[in-house]
Amino acid sequence: QVQVVESGGGSVQAGGSLRLSCLASVYTMRNYYMAWFRQAPGKEREAVAGISRGGDLTYYVDSVKGRFTISQDNAKKTLYLQMNLLKPEDTAMYYCAADSRTLVGRMWHRPDQYKYWGQGTQVTVSS
């Protein structure tokens, strides 16, 4: 069974940085496309960043472009989200998601494209 487990969340002041990690219990990580989603209280879950199978393509929601970077280490089977210049509006529960099916690039932001989900890690940014 595939499992993904997030870590690295915490509290930080505006302008600070955090790096989230997602350890994937998969046979070969390059067979999976993965993404980070977040959900703030009272809001819908939204995609933050995605990465293609093999890690050659990345996707970002406009609000985090230039501040967040998604990457993966295939040997360590770990997905990362480097978050810089954090803003209070980045405060949310962050989730790691993965799937092994073919992803149509324009659909990367849709939660229904991902079969496997982590438990979430909380990120709180204070002003």
Image (cartoon, helix red, strand yellow):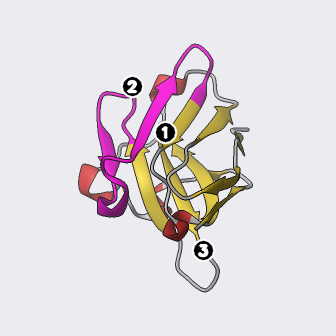
Q: Is residue 120 magenta?
A: no
Which residue, given by chain and number where applicable, does mark 1 sit on? 100
Which residue, given by chain and number where applicable, does mark 3 sit on? 40
Local crowd size for mark 2, using a 10 Å CA cut-off: few (<14), some (14–19), many (≥20): some
Q: Which mark is residue 54?
A: 2
Identify the secondary structure beneath mark 2. Answer: loop
Q: Quadrant of the N terminus?
A: top right
Nearer the camera: disc 3 or disc 1: 3
**Residue depicted at 50% across the width and 70% down the height:** 89
Q: Amino acid at mark 3?
A: Ala
Q: CA distance from mark 3 to mark 2?
A: 30 Å
Image: magenta residue range: 51-78
Nearer the camera: disc 3 or disc 2: 3
Instruction: Reply above or below: 49 against 82.
Output: below
Give x and y (percent) for residue 95.
62, 55
Give x and y (percent) for residue 15.
50, 53
Q: Amino acid at mark 2?
A: Gly
Give x and y (percent) for residue 49.
41, 50
**Residue depicted at 54% across the width and 68% down the height:** 88
For the residue pair 77 and 88, the one nearer the viewer reads as 88
